[in-house]
Amino acid sequence: MTVDVIPVNENFKGLSYGLWASIWDNWLLSEDPENTNRKDIVFLRGNLNYSPVSSNSEYPRFSDSSGALVRIGHNAEVIFEDTAIFIPILTAQYSLGDIYDGKRLNNEQELREAVNRDSDESLCLWATLTANKRASKIVNDLRKFRIESPLFKLVITNKSKLSGRTQDAAKPGMYDTVVGGFFVIIRSLPRGRYWLEFGGRGRSNYNTNSIYEITAHGLRSNVIADNSSARKKHVNLA
């Protein structure tokens, strides 16, 4: 099937891919990333299952490369037909003060160099959508959907549910951050039931795979009316 994907050089709701990525990153490390109050877009995520090799949280962290985030059945996403879907295929995020290959990242340029190196050294990507038992690629070439965010404020509270499960455990605080990688925004899906699988193999031991069941209902009712023409009749030009 042909998927209605927003081109990487276009805005959605007035925001670029990079700005959406910064909003997504704050959502990911928020107090309740399993839910969102937004109705116009749903954020998905990878399988954050990193843990230290010992009880010492400062030790290197590893994940099970064969694992996956599975959201099906009662954990499936139920959306309206006009709800956009934000898909983080393979991502990299760094903040000022982080250590990268033994060196502290001290400015925005160094953040972007780290994000880009992770993207450059990624090994493979995938994103498929299955409908009526037929799987299709979401886009022809995921490499064309590589983006970087602006420098933004990442806020992590002590109630963040996923901050301790990232590749480098994130402590509570406010950080100057850049996130980048490969992202796709589906503008909408026709009414139906879908299976969405995405992920990739990145630099070092970074692996991610996610499987989402998504049910799209009919169009959301729009109660907003544009009364510009009616108002114009009452304008006094004298």
Image (spheres, rainbow, N blue to C red):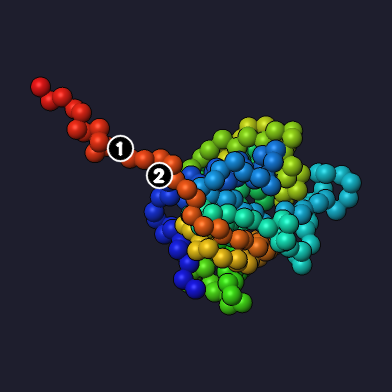
* Residue located 73% across and 45% down the image: 162
Against 224, is 52 above or below? below
Determine which of the numbered discs, if any, sits on residue 7 in the image. Answer: none
Looking at the rendered image, the disc whose residue lies closer to the viewer, 2 or 1, is: 1
Please name the residue that numbered disc 2 is placed on.
Answer: 14
The image shows residue 25 at horizontal and vertical percentages of 60, 45
* Residue located 62% across and 55% down the image: 78
* Residue located 53% across and 49% down the image: 41
Quarter assignment of residue 182? bottom right
* Residue located 67% across and 36% down the image: 156
Q: Residues within 10 Å of mark 1 (few under 14, many from 20)?
A: few
> From the viewer's perspective, is 112 left or right of 175?
left
Q: CA distance from mark 2 to mark 1?
A: 22 Å
Q: Amino acid at mark 1?
A: Asn
> From the viewer's perspective, is 115 left or right of 75?
left
Please name the residue that numbered disc 1 is placed on.
Answer: 227
| Element class at badge 2 | loop
Q: Is residue 125 visible?
A: no
